[in-house]
Image: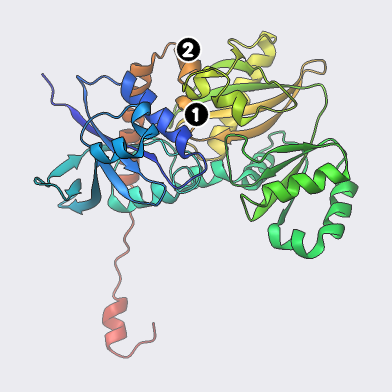
Amino acid sequence: MKPKISLAIIFGGQSVEHEVSIITACQLMENINQDKYEIIPIYIAKNGEWLVSNRLPKIKDFRDPEEVKNILSECYLFRHKGQVFLKTIGGLFSKEIKIEVFFPVIHGTFGEDGTLQGLLEMLGAPYVGSGVVGSAVGMDKVMQKDIFRANGLPAVDYVWFLREEWIRSQNELVKTIERRLQYPLFIKPVNLGSSIAVSRADNRRQLTTAVELAANFDRRIMVEQGIEDIIEINCSILGYKKLEASVCEQPIKSGELLSYEDKYIKGGKAKGMASLSRLIPAPIPKRLTLEIQETAKKAFRAADAGGVARIDFLVDIKKQKFWVCEINTLPGSLAFYLWEKSGYPFPKLVDKLVELARERFNDRKATNYSFESNLLAMAGKGAKA
């Protein structure tokens, strides 16, 4: 019997999507093949503390702060002789655990935006998902659109600005927005997910209110051109060098946009994105499905994504036209509901993601990060650095 793979699942985090991350992590731990993996649950609290659980946590554990304390110990990561270890702090028996692969499932800031990925890169550890660049692009809605357009992918028009610029020059910005775009408009924080602080504006008053809301959550705000009579179609991509596209889905929204409540609450239970009402496969023509799947692959590649991502599209069915809305490099619930319909049940999806993490890690090792020179010797002899 093969030894188990030690797999550290990192979740929680200092993000407005903290609770969403807990749901994704618990879904992952409930569906993972425990005969194949030794699971190490690492929880990052809202105050930034790194904690490890002495058992597989459940969603209900996080509803009671006292219960959480009973199953968590402080910990830290370190590298020794080319291996990465976790060390627990406190308690009668502190211990060191070797970790072979990391599986980050922190949605939003300090987890999905490249910061955590940078830490794992410096540790020299294999990890699931996109790298530093792909993760950063996946969180930044402005950078995404610029990259998509540079690669010939369709994206709707937008205006972006800084919170400080809005405070200083609100009237001028409103005039610029109204000159370049037409109502309806959608206002979004540039670096945020789960539809938090996203609003529709049909007039100047609503625009002002929406920008004020978005400015509470980010220093950069994007105002996006709204398109009438469209539907949303989502497609997930899986891979690193070789890419696979999932079936497409049509999420069912309750209003003008998919809200946080649509995505996570209306299902009645804490099932994350799996509880969202959706049509799978999306009821769109086959030709359009294939075009969207191929465009999703191009968007995935353009963003330098890896592992699993979900690409969201705005689609005009009458005109058979679509636009890339955004890429989510760590989709809610890992988009497993799309891969179940594409021949990857959850345990098989996890196996594939771990395999891709190792493939990417081995590819990284083929890159030379050192350059031999005699610069220090020259500097010691009086040469200018």
Furthest toward the bottom, the residue is 382
Percent of width and height locating residue 349: 38, 20
Q: How is the image coloured?
A: rainbow
Percent of width and height locating residue 189: 65, 46
Percent of width and height locating residue 100: 22, 38
Q: Amino acid at mark 2?
A: Ser
State whether residue 348 is above or below residue 102: above
Q: Residues within 10 Å of mark 2 (few under 14, many from 20)?
A: some
Picture quadrant where residue 57 is located: top left
Quadrant containing the C terminus in the rendered view: bottom left
Q: Residues within 10 Å of mark 1 (few under 14, many from 20)?
A: many
Q: Residue 172: in sight, yes or no?
A: yes
Q: Are marks 1 and 2 in contact (CB under 8 Å)?
A: no
Numbered disc 1: secondary structure: helix
Q: CA distance from mark 1 to mark 2?
A: 17 Å
Quadrant containing the N terminus in the rendered view: top left
In depth, the one of 53 and 152 nearer the eye is 53
Q: Residue at x 61, y 49 (%)?
A: 217
Q: Which callout, 1 or 2, points to the residue nearer the camera?
A: 1
**On residue 342, which mark appears?**
2
Picture quadrant where residue 231 is located: top right
Residue under label 1: 332
Picture quadrant where residue 202 is located: top right
In depth, the one of 92 and 182 nearer the eye is 92
Percent of width and height locating residue 61: 33, 31
